[in-house]
Amino acid sequence: MPRKMLKDKILELVEARQYVTYAEFERFFPEHKEDPPLSRLVHGSVKNIIYWIGMDQEFADAVAELTVEKLIFMHPTPPLTYLIDGAGLDLPLVKRPPKNGYEKPHWLPVTFCTHPAYS
């Protein structure tokens, strides 16, 4: 599927549902789920912070572009949000990331909305 079409479908889902998890993305975009899961969606500047494992690079790039374009926004969420969606990662949770990142992978559960975080 062309990148623009994929981005439009992701944006449409986030606009309709709000607070969309990667687990929901897997259900709505099964063609972008890796089996076995190989790719890690990671924090760009803090070492070993993992958002999700198992979505392909095309999907990850589309989500990243939508966030850079400020069309969708990433919000930290409790892991219970993912458990409700029937998913999660078997990694320690991010609490207070060290300045130079973690030595081992840690999970930062996030959701996606069409509005920035409230301050």
Image (cartoon, helix red, strand yellow):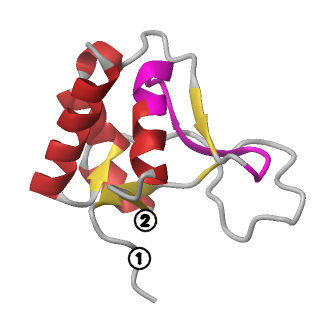
Amino acid type for the residue under numbered disc 1:
Ala
x 87%, y 46%: residue: 103
x 46%, y 89%: residue: 119
Would residue 55 be counted in the magenta stretch? yes
Q: Which mark is residue 98?
A: none
x 87%, y 65%: residue: 99
Horizontal side of residue 42 vs 36, given as left or right: right
Residue 53: x %, y % from top left: 52, 30
**Discs 2, 1 touching: Cβ within 8 Å:** yes
Q: Which residue is mark 1?
A: 117
Q: Is residue 73 above or below residue 115?
A: above
Residue 66: x %, y % from top left: 39, 46
How far apart marks 2 and 1 lie (CA) works out to 7 Å
Amino acid type for the residue under numbered disc 2:
His
| Residue 46 visible, this angle | yes
| Residue 56 visible, this angle | no
Segment colored magenta: 45-61
Q: Which residue is mark 2?
A: 75
Q: Residues within 10 Å of mark 1 (few under 14, many from 20)?
A: few
Q: Earlier in the sequence, mark 2 or mark 1?
A: 2
